[in-house]
Image (cartoon, rainbow, N blue to C red):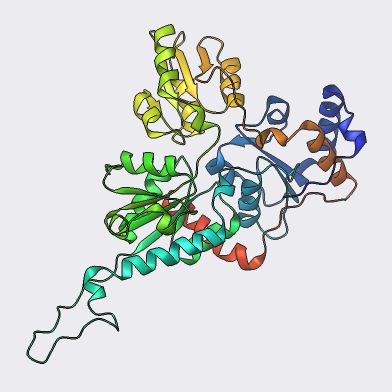
């Protein structure tokens, strides 16, 4: 999304000036304002958040203050959209920098998902049994026995990771599916498989695959990857009929960087190390690690660990560094020595936060995120389904 240039006055602020002016603006706005901060935000932002959390926690936290006029979401665009969908119409949701998107969320768009859905419906409705009853199929002669009644076509349930655009959440809501986060993906997928026969999971193939494996499914025989740039996603019709999981070919650019070799290197350097990674990592990394889970799980696991323990963590560097600062009695470091922050999260700079807050003090709303009603209705259905199913 296009972001207008930051006014020069704010671009020129020193870190100390921006910090002081943010504090002053927050004090003036008082209870009219709630600031939400994702764990991957830099420390200079997270210090000003009234609530910090992962996508799931912040989706719930957005509803905690109905008296607030403004919710400033220090995260990325899809998170602000979800907050707008879940909060009352009188509350205004603001993203400090509209250019803070998500490369993973951009890997699936509505046109591609609709095309995938149409192809899957065609293939799954044309099983060999059903094909025999198609209009152009050869009819039996009067002396031949009639074909047996075919089994009903398999039902697909769409599940979208919360890291997706609002119109994809709406598609899922309209087609009987749910949203999930890395915290509740197993619960959401289990629910989906009770409703139908197959899951179309997008946009992150790795979270989908790791979730399926956690539930006992075989990634080699029961899962296929759907590449939106290839006919039938790069699959045969038979493979699509056989698969329990159709996984969208998307990924997180940060978590894709973590490797088994990095884990092996950490274990050689620190024999007592415990390796903890996010389920957006590739499956070989998740299998090789000691533990895997959402950002909230990572935080709680480190907090509960013994003093003197050593942790190699495979997730965004701002969170890893913050854990190291908050737990000086433990050795905590990032698996990737090259250190790769989430570049879009990093676009929420203190100067942008200061700019939107001082405009609110003056009665001006800048960078509001507003989801159209025709999208919001079904997207809310999918988000509420998640909050109900995964409560």
Q: Residue at x 84, y 22 (%)?
A: 16
Residue 279: x and y in percent read 44, 35
Q: Image check: 97 left or right of 228?
A: right
Residue 347: x and y in percent read 72, 35
Can residue 382 be seen by looking at this rendering?
A: yes
Q: Residue at x 44, y 44 (%)?
A: 205
Query: Between residues 64 and 265, which one lies in front from this camera angle?
Result: 265
Residue 50: x and y in percent read 68, 36
Can residue 270 be seen by looking at this rendering?
A: no
The image shows residue 261, relative to residue 170, as above or below, that is: above
Residue 98: x and y in percent read 74, 46
Residue sitting farthest toward the right = 9
**Residue 349 appears in which quarter of the rendering?**
top right
Q: Residue at x 27, y 42 (%)?
A: 218
**Residue 104 appears in which quarter of the rendering?**
top right
The image shows residue 56, relative to residue 158, as above or below, that is: above
The image shows a total of numbered marks equal to: 0
The image shows residue 106, relative to residue 255, as above or below, that is: below
Q: Image check: 4 left or right of 254?
A: right
**Residue 99 appears in which quarter of the rendering?**
top right
The image shows residue 51, relative to residue 77, as above or below, that is: above
Q: Residue at x 32, y 70 (%)?
A: 125
Query: Between residues 314 and 16, which one lies in front from this camera angle?
Result: 314
Query: Between residues 77 and 2, which one lies in front from this camera angle?
Result: 2
Q: Image check: 106 left or right of 93?
A: left
Residue sitting farthest toward the bottom = 142
């Amino acid at each position: 999304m296009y972001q207008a240039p930051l006014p020069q006055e704010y671009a020129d602020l020193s870190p100390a000036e921006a910090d002081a002016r943010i504090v002053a603006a927050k004090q003036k706005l008082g209870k009219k304002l709630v600031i939400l901060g994702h764990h991957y935000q830099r420390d200079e932002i997270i210090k000003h958040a009234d609530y910090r959390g992962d996508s799931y926690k912040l989706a719930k936290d957005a509803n905690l203050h109905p008296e607030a006029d403004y919710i400033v979401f220090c995260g990325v665009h899809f998170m602000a959209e979800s907050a707008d969908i879940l909060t009352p119409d009188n509350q205004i949701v603001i993203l400090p920098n509209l250019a803070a998107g998500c490369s993973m969320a951009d890997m699936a768009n509505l046109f591609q998902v609709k095309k995938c859905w149409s192809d899957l419906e065609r293939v799954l409705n044309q099983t060999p049994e059903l094909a025999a009853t198609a209009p152009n199929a050869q009819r039996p002669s009067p002396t031949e026995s009639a074909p047996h009644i075919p089994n009903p076509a398999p039902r697909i349930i769409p599940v979208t990771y919360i890291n997706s655009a609002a119109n994809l959440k709406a598609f899922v809501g309209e087609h009987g599916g749910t949203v999930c986060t890395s915290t509740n993906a197993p619960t959401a997928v289990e629910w989906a498989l009770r409703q139908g026969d197959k899951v179309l999971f997008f946009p992150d193939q790795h979270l989908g695959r790791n979730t399926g494996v956690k539930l006992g499914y075989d990634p080699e025989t029961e899962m296929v990857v759907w590449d939106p740039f290839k006919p039938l996603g790069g699959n045969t019709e038979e493979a699509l009929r056989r698969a329990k999981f159709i996984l969208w070919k998307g990924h997180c650019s940060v978590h894709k960087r973590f490797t088994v070799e990095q884990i092996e290197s950490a274990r050689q350097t620190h024999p007592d190390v415990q390796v903890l990674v996010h389920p957006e990592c590739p499956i070989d990394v998740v299998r090789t690690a000691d533990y895997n889970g959402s950002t909230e799980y990572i935080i709680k696991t480190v907090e509960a660990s013994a003093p003197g323990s050593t942790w190699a963590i495979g997730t965004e560097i701002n969170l890893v560094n913050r854990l190291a600062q908050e737990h000086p009695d433990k050795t905590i470091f990032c698996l990737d020595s090259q250190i790769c922050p989430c570049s879009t999260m990093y676009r929420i700079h203190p100067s942008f936060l200061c700019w939107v807050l001082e405009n609110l003090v003056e009665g001006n709303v800048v960078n509001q995120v507003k989801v159209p009603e025709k999208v919001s209705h079904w997207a809310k259905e999918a988000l509420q389904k998640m909050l109900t199913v995964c409560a």
